[in-house]
């Protein structure tokens, strides 16, 4: 087990920082939001929307988890789906417990390139977790950006994450927000204008054109269809950004687990422009001719 006391700035970059879990909130079945205190102010200041941390649960190991929000008093929010060994162990923790964090890693969304532009964000399923950190950054500095469209789709309405936040976003007059599920059932969705369908159906309802910059995060199958729609509207490949999930271990471009088309997704990604991906043969083969 890792000796947290040895974890200090300047120590091995593989050693996680000891961080306390402040709060745990259930968002949906098997999807929890963990608020974690990051006392290292330097690490916190370096965090950017779309980046991720290696989250270490003592005795279970590490898993890469995206920053879902940078919240009050140096806290980070991670929206986690219970999948396997590490995430199941994380679900056993309670507020006041300690975990380890290494990071932030990856490039994040190119928010500087988005300034002054109209933006469309498309989230599928758990992809809403990293995109949330992007819309927070944009809304924190709303005047710096043009029009905003936010689209969020999921399979079942009971999988909706950040229900209360979406209720508030839908009320805003300075952005267009669309939410859809392929099947609507389960708990009350009152006050949330849910559509039945997929994110591609929502794209047809949204007002946007070739002048928009797009940020996408969702399952690989979603990318193919969303990219097709965006390209039909004339968006340029260099203005379409996708966050790619690859198996990752070190997060620092050393182990090679996340190598994709000769690039390290942990270092150069996880966010790539479509223009970059067009040159990565492996991605084209995995995700079809549109990518
Ligand atoms: C950059 C990045 C950001 C991520 N952000 C989040 C997040 O915000 N929230 C969240 O819940 N999850 C996120 N994930 C996914 C998460 O890291 C994996 O689900 C992780 O494997 C969970 O660890 P585990 O030990 O619980 O599962 P494991 O026991 O490692 O794996 C369970 C199963 O999932 C498979 N698997 C694991 N990772 C992947 C992968 N990347 N692609 C395909 N199959 C995989 C394994 O082969 C195994 O079958 C992210 C992944 C990456 C690379």
Image (cartoon, helix red, strand yellow):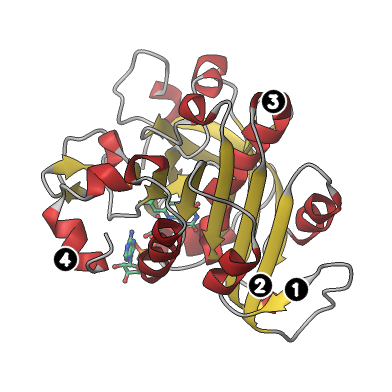
Q: Earlier in the sequence, mark 4 or mark 3?
A: 3
Q: Which residue is mark 3?
A: 141
Q: Any mark on residue 194, and which?
A: 1
The relative height of residue 26 versus residue 13 in the rendered view (above or below) is below
Q: Residue at x 10, y 44 (%)?
A: 262
Are the two marked residues, 2 and 4, in contact with CB atoms closer than 8 angstroms? no
CA neighbours of label 4 inside 10 A, class few (<14), some (14 to 19), many (20+): few
Q: How far apart are the alpha carbons under marks 2 and 4?
A: 29 Å
Q: Which mark is residue 48?
A: none
Front-lying residue, 46 or 97? 46
Query: How many other residues sit within 10 Å of disc 1, few (<14), some (14-19) or many (≥20)?
Result: some
For marks 1 and 3, give the CA distance.
28 Å
Callout 2 crowding tier (Cα within 10 Å): few <14, some 14–19, many ≥20: many
Q: Looking at the image, is mark 2 or mark 1 earlier in the sequence?
A: 2
Mark 2 = which residue?
180
Query: How far apart, in angstroms, are the residues tagged by discs 2 and 1?
Result: 5 Å
Q: Which residue is mark 4?
A: 285
């Amino acid at each position: 087990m890792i000796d947290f006391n040895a974890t200090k700035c300047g120590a091995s970059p593989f050693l996680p920082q000891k961080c306390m879990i402040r709060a745990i909130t259930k968002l949906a079945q098997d999807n929890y939001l963990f608020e974690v205190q990051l006392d290292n102010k330097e690490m916190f200041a370096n965090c950017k929307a779309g980046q991720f941390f290696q989250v270490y649960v003592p005795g279970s190991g590490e898993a890469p988890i995206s920053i879902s929000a940078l919240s009050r008093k140096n806290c980070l929010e991670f929206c986690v789906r219970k999948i396997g060994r590490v995430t199941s162990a994380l679900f056993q923790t309670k507020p006041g417990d300690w975990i380890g964090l290494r990071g932030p890693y990856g490039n994040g969304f190119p928010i500087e390139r988005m300034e002054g532009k109209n933006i469309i964000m498309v989230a599928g399923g758990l992809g809403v977790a990293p995109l949330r950190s992007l819309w927070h950054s944009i809304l924190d500095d709303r005047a710096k950006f043009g029009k905003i469209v936010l689209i969020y789709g999921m399979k079942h309405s009971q999988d909706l994450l950040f229900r209360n936040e979406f209720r508030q976003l839908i009320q805003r007059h300075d952005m267009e927000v669309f939410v859809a599920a392929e099947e609507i059932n389960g708990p009350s969705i009152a006050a949330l204008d849910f559509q039945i369908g997929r994110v591609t159906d929502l794209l047809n309802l949204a007002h946007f054109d070739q002048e928009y910059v797009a940020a996408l995060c969702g399952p690989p199958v979603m990318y193919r269809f969303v990219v097709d729609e965006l390209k039909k509207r004339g968006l340029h490949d260099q203005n379409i950004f996708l966050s790619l999930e690859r198996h990752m271990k070190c997060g620092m471009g050393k182990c090679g687990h996340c190598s994709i088309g000769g690039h390290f997704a942990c270092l150069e990604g996880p966010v790539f422009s479509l223009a970059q991906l067009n040159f990565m043969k492996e991605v084209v083969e995995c995700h079809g001719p549109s990518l």
